[in-house]
Amino acid sequence: MDAVKEEIAVTAARLVVEEGAEYGDAKRRALKQLRLSGRSALPDNAQVEQAVLEYIALFCADTQPGELRALRELALVWLERLERFRPYLTGAVWRGTATRLSDIYLQLFCDDPKSAEIALIDMGVRFEVSTVIGFQGTPVDALSVHAACPALRAQVGIHLLVYDFDDLRGALKPDEQGRRMRGDAAAVRNLLHDGAI
């Protein structure tokens, strides 16, 4: 990686860890902080993730494992609550780079996309609906809720990304490095049992 991309990745990593920024936003803000042109080549997400791991190892090694465990435990509660929608955990909480400022991202694979909204209403859960770009590059509905995380003594954002059931097949393919990009409740239980980061 060239020196400029590396500097952007390191600055973005600090924003991700210290402020809970998402990778795209962190890279754009890093450009501004470093006073670089908006046309500068940006590091890819894998480079930012590596910088995040290094930042955590240097500055958060004593607190991050406990925070990650608390977020995974909360994610598991929601995976179990939403079991009928074939939920999968993804993002920083799945990959092990989450801190107390990270949100939880669950992907739901529904026969009827509106059924998840109806289920939340039936549970008495307040949520906001927005549209985001999904893992296939197409728009999907995101149902965002806030849930108490007693272990962190904080409210945590949980984003439920609603996909069609047919999208599940493509979702289970590994990334370029052979890593699973998401995990179901059983996989999260294994992470918690093994104490994996």
Image: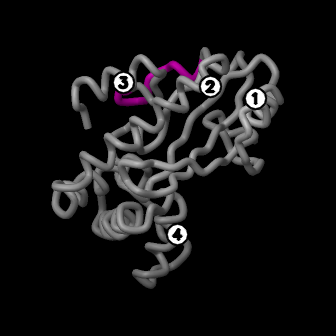
Bounds of the magenta segment:
170-179
Q: Which mark is residue 119?
A: 1
| Identity, as a three-letter code, of the amino acid under mark 4 | Arg
User: Please, what secondary structure does the residue beneath circle 1 have?
Assistant: helix
User: Please, what secondary structure does the residue beneath circle 3 have?
Assistant: loop
Among numbered discs 2 and 3, the one appearing first in the sequence:
2
**10 Å crowding of disc 2: few (<14), some (14-19), many (20+):** some
Task: Determine which residue is flagged by label 3.
Answer: 178
Q: Is residue 163 above or below residue 155?
A: above
Q: Is residue 102 above or below residue 115?
A: below
**10 Å crowding of disc 4: few (<14), some (14-19), many (20+):** some
| 133 relative position to 28: left or right | right
Q: Nearer the viewer, residue 49 or 60?
A: 60
Residue in view at x 47 percent, y 28 percent: 182
Q: Position of residue 144 (x, y in %)?
A: 67, 48
| Identity, as a three-letter code, of the amino acid under mark 2 | Leu
Asked whether the residues under the numbered discs 1 and 2 touch, taking CB atoms below 8 Å apart as contact, a structural biologist would say yes
Among numbered discs 3 and 1, the one appearing first in the sequence:
1
Residue in view at x 45 percent, y 38 percent: 74
Q: Which mark is residue 28?
A: 4
Task: Determine which residue is flagged by label 2.
Answer: 82
